[in-house]
Structures are given as structure tokens and as C-alpha cells.
Image: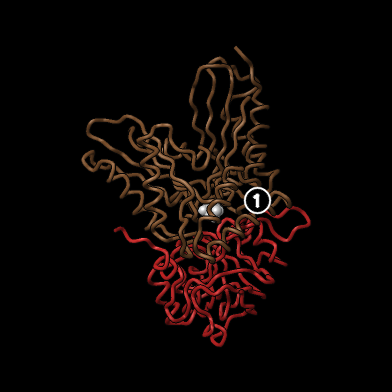
Chain colours: A red, B brown
Amino acid sequence: MSKKVTLPLNDEVLKDLKAGDNLLLTGVIYVARDAAHKRMVEALDQGKTLPFDIKGATVYYMGPSPARSGRVIGSAGPTTSGRMDAYAPRLIAQGLKGMIGKGLRSQAVKDAMVKHKAVYLGAIGGAGAVISKSIKKAEVVAYEELGAEALRRLEVADFPVTVINDIYGGNLYEEGKAKYQVKAP
Amino acid sequence: MREIKASDITNTVARLFEHSCHYLPPDVVIALKQAKEKEKSPVCRDVLDRILENANIAGKEQIPLCQDTGAAVVMLELGQEVHITGGDLYTAVNEGVRQGYDKGYLRKSIVNGPCFARVNTKDNTPAMIHTDIVPGDRLKISVLPKGGGSENCSRLTALSPSQGRQGVIDFVVNLVSEVGSNPCPPVIIGVGIGGTTDKTMFIAKKALLRKVGEPSPDPEVANLEKEILEKVNNLGIGAMGYGGTVTALAVHVETFPCHIASMPVAVNMQCWCSRHEEAIL
Ligand code: SF4
């Protein structure tokens, strides 16, 4: 069973989310990967504002394939989140509430999620075709010259994700593994 | 001497990349369906369902299976009786990559200056080309669009010969455990043992072209594949790392003779989205 969640996320919604929950997200998410993260953190370093309001925002780690004409977007699955670990705690401290990606996070990111109340949501890696069906609108909002790595704003409806890290320190990767691990005799 | 036109090579490479990014090889689909039957975790069975649904949609609606349509790896087996006319081989291959990635709406993911400016080459070239010269008058072209997420989980090590078979098992299993959900499990694990380190990684990658789960013809190697697979699946990582009993679809081991002082081992990690295709001209 999936829980329907309307974005933006807030502390009221986040307190009911637990590692392992399946969610269907509806609302606005921002897309950024390596190069866009580097630029955002550089902007913060220089005391500049970010290209979007990060308070309560959800960021999707993704770099789409080009859209065929008449389509909203191309294939649009998650990229490996760990490469954004160097930047994520900064953004979480600024008010980022949700991150969507795949793969392991660093301890610093996990600590920041508990401290500032934010969640990490997993999307299915490689399932970019089926995921693209839940994206209703896409536009580049900054760093257009980065191509596939540009910062995008998406409107999504029933976008499927699974809670990996919740605000209580719950971690699906660890809990799931512990459940199915076969210890050597 | 048999003549092959450079333009035929270009067209073939273009078609192979475009097609392989939209259609999973049938053996991979079968392996995923079998994984679903074996998987004990309902969460991971759901993930596998989505993955199979994705494969269906990708072909039908011409949306790439995964947005990461990879670095363009091309393996050539060039018959020594072949004469290429109307251009040179590598230019023809790179032109095929350029056209295939453009026409197929595939993502261009190659940057120049890897530790400097990292400027996108905008056409996904250069291809990573490996050529074997073989007897005969044919050209076999295998393409393997290789995603960054799984490639980043590949590793090369120089074990001491004293570490033996057990050393290989420990190296592979520890790596899979360490990278967890990063390479988009269930994975296919290419393992190279022996050679010199360049050769070791190459045979590990080449092992990915094998039909998923087809055992090595060498019983000793097949046995090792089986043991590693069992140990990897005992880790409990499961599809997308959500916890489950199928972490890998297959382990393919290739070996090569090596120096008396050496025992290099390489893992080339492949995601479930194992795209590859070949043609013979
Ligand atoms: S590891 Fe494979 S399936 Fe996962 S995002 Fe990369 S290319 Fe796609």
C-alpha cells in the first residue's frame, strides 16, 4: 500500500513517514545532480541566493535523457546519491526537506537529516521509462548550459518512492539487509 | 580479402546503441523473472515488477530503459581478411555513436578533461573501443552502453597468489557488501582473474557479454561462480538494496594465465539494466 503525499513536505507530514514506507508524491520537485549542486553551494559560499526557494523543497538527483518532440521529458530515473553527499548537509541546513535518489548516504548526511528533520527517498534505479510517466511538466530554471545536468523544476503526480531514511534515524538499507541476511554457519 | 564499407559500420553501431538502450536482452528479462520467483521479500518482488514493467514501457513507447545511456563501450572482433573501405575503422565507430545517441534521444554523458573542466563532448564520443584481430573475413561488433552508477562500483586489486580461491571470493563478496544499493541491484558481476591488470579488467568486462547465468565451460570456474553467487545473495541486500534474497542475477568469471608473482582480480559491476547487443558484418 502506498501513502499519498502532497508536496511541499513539512514537519507535520515528515513525522508520520517511516523507513520502508511506499509513497506517491504529487507537487513540485527540483532536479539537480553533481554540477548543479556544485554551483548551488558555490552560490551559498558567495552569499548569493539559490535559484529556487529551498525551504521545504524536495530535490531529485537525476539527469534525464533528451525528450522526444511532444514529450515532457525523456527517461528520468535516479542517479547515485552518494556523489551529492559533499553538498547535501549544507542544503539540508538551509531547509531542504526531501532528497530523492538511489544508493548509500554518508553519516554526515544521515546526521543532518535527523538534526534538521529531512528524509531520503529511494526511486528505482534504471526504471527511468516508467518513472517518466509520473512527470507532468518539466522546465529548466537555471544553469541551462549544463545540459542534462541543468537545474529543473518538475511537476509530478503520484511519483513513486520508498522512504530510505526517516527523521528518526530509521534506515531501510540496514533494516532490510538485517532481515534477509544469511549468516555464515 | 573481403571489403566492408565504413558507412556500414557507422550505421550498424548507431542502430545497435539506439536499440540496446530501449530493449533489454531476452536473457536478462528471463533472469529478472526468475529472480522474482526466487525472491522472498515482498518489497523486492514489487521492485522487480516495476523493473519488468519499465522494460515493457521502454520498448513500446521508445523511452530509454534508463536515463543513463552510458559510456559507449564497443568491442570489435576484426577478421584479418577484412579490408575497410571509404574511411577508417575508429572514425566510423565514433560516427556511429554520434548518430545513434542523437537519433535515439540518448543522453550524452561523456566529459573531456576528467579532473579539470569536465566539458561535455555533446555527442557521447569518444567510444571506448577494444579490438581483437581474429582469423576470418567478418567483423563482429558488440556494443555495451555502460552506466556510471555500476561502473563506479568496479574494482581492481592485486592479490597475493597465497590468497588463492578464497581471496577471490572474499574480495568480490566484500565489494558487493560495501557498495550495497549503489550499482542498482540485482547486479550481474563480471570477474576477471589473472593476466596483467589491464587484461584482468578487460576480461571482467567481457564477461558481461555472456548470456546471464550461463556457467563457465570450465567446471572449476563454474564452481567458483556458483559459490560467489550464493555468498553474495546471502548478504541480504536485495533489489535496490531494500533487503532481499536476490542481490545478484549472476556471477561470470573469466580467467587468464598470469605471472608467477601475481594474482590480479577485477570486478566489473553491471546493473540489472544490462544492455548489450551485437552484430556480424
Ligand atoms: S547503475 Fe545502471 S540502472 Fe542504475 S542508474 Fe546507472 S545505468 Fe541506470
The foreground one among B233 and B8 is B233
> Looking at the image, which residue is at 49% across and 62% down?
B40
Q: Which residue is mark 1?
A: B64
Q: Which of the 4 image quadrants contains residue B166?
A: top left
Q: Which of the 4 image quadrants contains residue B99?
A: top right
Q: Around disc 1, counting alpha carbons within 10 Å, would you say few (fewer than 14), some (14 to 19), or many (20 or more)?
A: many
Total tally of numbered discs in the picture: 1
The foreground one among A73 and B270 is B270
Farthest-out residue, top? B1
> Looking at the image, which residue is at 25% across and 35% down?
B262
> Which x, y percent locates residue B102?
68, 44
> Looking at the image, which residue is at 59% across and 78% down?
A53
| Residue B232 in the figure: left or right of residue B57 | left
Q: Is residue A94 above or below residue A75?
A: below
The foreground one among B139 and B188 is B188
> Which x, y percent locates residue B231?
37, 52
The foreground one among B237 and A63 is B237
Q: Quadrant of the N terminus of chain B?
A: top right
Farthest-out residue, right? A70
Q: Secondary structure at mark 1?
A: loop
Q: Is residue B32 above or below residue A3?
A: above
> Which x, y percent locates residue A9?
58, 81
The three-letter code of the residue at mark 1 reads Pro
> Which x, y percent locates residue B183?
47, 54
Q: Which of the 4 image quadrants contains residue B101?
A: top right
Q: Chain ID for label 1? A: B
